[in-house]
Image (spheres, rainbow, N blue to C red):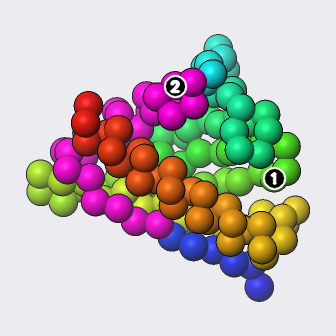
Amino acid sequence: MSRSRTISITVKKKTGDTFDAILQLPPKMMPDAKINEDGWWSFTGPHGKSKLKFNENKSLGILDHKFIDEESVWDVPMRVISNDEYSEIMITLNKPDEITDKQFNQRVDEIGEMVQNMKQIIESS
């Protein structure tokens, strides 16, 4: 059976503003992040050379993305859901076959910290 974890946070911003801010996060979180003509962000992550590409639909709050680093490939469902003056961000992490359960647990912890940083950046902009 494959493993998954969902991380959910509340952001003190309206949904449209949160959605737009997330699309602009890579260079704010990874100083060497550069976007290519094909829509892929390239940067150095905790596990080496990495890249990220969003498959977004703003009207539906969909910010699914593919994340690839030197150890694994992740297809990440991500949603931004309206909650009055706030937004709920939900990210589901499905364990890639190429990493162990221990590595998955470590990655979930790392991504949890990254999500908290993401929240601070979004709320301060």
Mark 1 — residue? Answer: 72
Residue 82: mark in rendering? none
Classify residue 102 as left or right of residue 105: right
At a point 67% along the width and 54% down the height, the residue shown is 75
Find residue 4 and report its horizontal and vertical position in percent. 63, 74
Q: Which residue lies at the image location 56% right of the left edge and 38% below the top edge? A: 54
Q: Which residues are magenta?
A: 7-31
Q: CA distance from mark 2 to mark 1?
A: 22 Å
Question: Which quadrant: the N terminus?
Answer: bottom right
> Where does residue 29 sit, x and y in percent of width and height?
51, 34
Which element carries disc 1, helix, strand or loop?
loop
| Crowd around label 1: few <14 · some 14–19 · many ≥20 (10 Å) | some
- Residue 93 shows in this picture: no
- In the rendered image, residue 68 lying in the magenta stretch gets the answer no
Q: Marks 1 and 2: in contact by CB < 8 Å?
A: no
Residue 27 shows which numbered tag? 2
What type is the residue that disc 2 sits on?
Pro
Indicate left or right for 46 with 99 as reference.
Answer: left
Q: Which quadrant of the view contains residue 30?
A: top right
